[in-house]
Image (cartoon, helix red, strand yellow):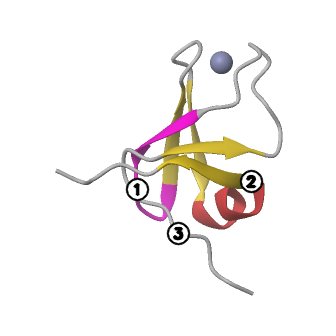
Amino acid sequence: MERKQFQLNDIVEMKKQHPCGTNAWKIIRMGADIRIKCEGCQHSVLIPRKEFEKKMKRLIIQRDTE
Ligand SMILES: [Zn+2]
């Protein structure tokens, strides 16, 4: 299976949408844990990378880093 590719500042769609109704999350921190921010309400969550990879559905927008 192909490994999901993502990087800082990418916008991703998760398997479960945020309660605010938006399903677009921006990756704002990468590490062992990944912090994503909801594009709708700006709420941010920190998730372990493994879990993030499981919950991420697809990449919506790929942004250039710097
Ligand atoms: Zn939200």
- As rendered, which of 23 and 43 lies closer to the eye? 23
Whichever of callouts 3 and 2 sits on the residue coming sooner in the sequence is: 3
From the image, tell me which residue sits under label 1: 30
For the residues labelled 1 and 2, the Cα–Cα distance comes to 17 Å
Hey, which quadrant is residue 12 in on the image? top right
Give amino acid for label 2.
Answer: Lys
From the image, tell me which residue sits under label 3: 5
Q: Which residues are magenta?
A: 25-33
Is 11 placed above or below 24 here? below
Relative horizontal placement of residue 30, taking residue 43 as reference (left or right): left
Whichever of callouts 1 and 2 sits on the residue coming sooner in the sequence is: 1
Q: Position of residue 9 (x, y in %)?
A: 37, 44
Give amino acid for label 1.
Answer: Met
From the image, tell me which residue sits under label 2: 57
Q: Main secondary structure of the magenta part?
A: strand
10 Å neighbourhood of mark 3: few (<14), some, or many (≥20)? few
Asked if the residue under mark 2 is in contact with the one under mark 1, i.e. CB atoms within 8 Å, the reply is: no
Whichever of callouts 3 and 1 sits on the residue coming sooner in the sequence is: 3
**Of the two numbered discs 1 and 2 in the rendering, the one whose residue sits closer to the viewer:** 2
Asked if the residue under mark 2 is in contact with the one under mark 3, i.e. CB atoms within 8 Å, the reply is: no
Q: Position of residue 50 (x, y in %)?
A: 66, 67
Secondary-structure class at tag 1 = loop
Q: Position of residue 6 (x, y in %)?
A: 49, 62
Is 33 placed above or below 13 here? below
Give amino acid for label 3.
Answer: Gln
10 Å neighbourhood of mark 1: few (<14), some, or many (≥20)? some
**Which residue is at a point 52% across and 69% down the rendered structure image?**
5
For the residues labelled 3 and 1, the Cα–Cα distance comes to 12 Å
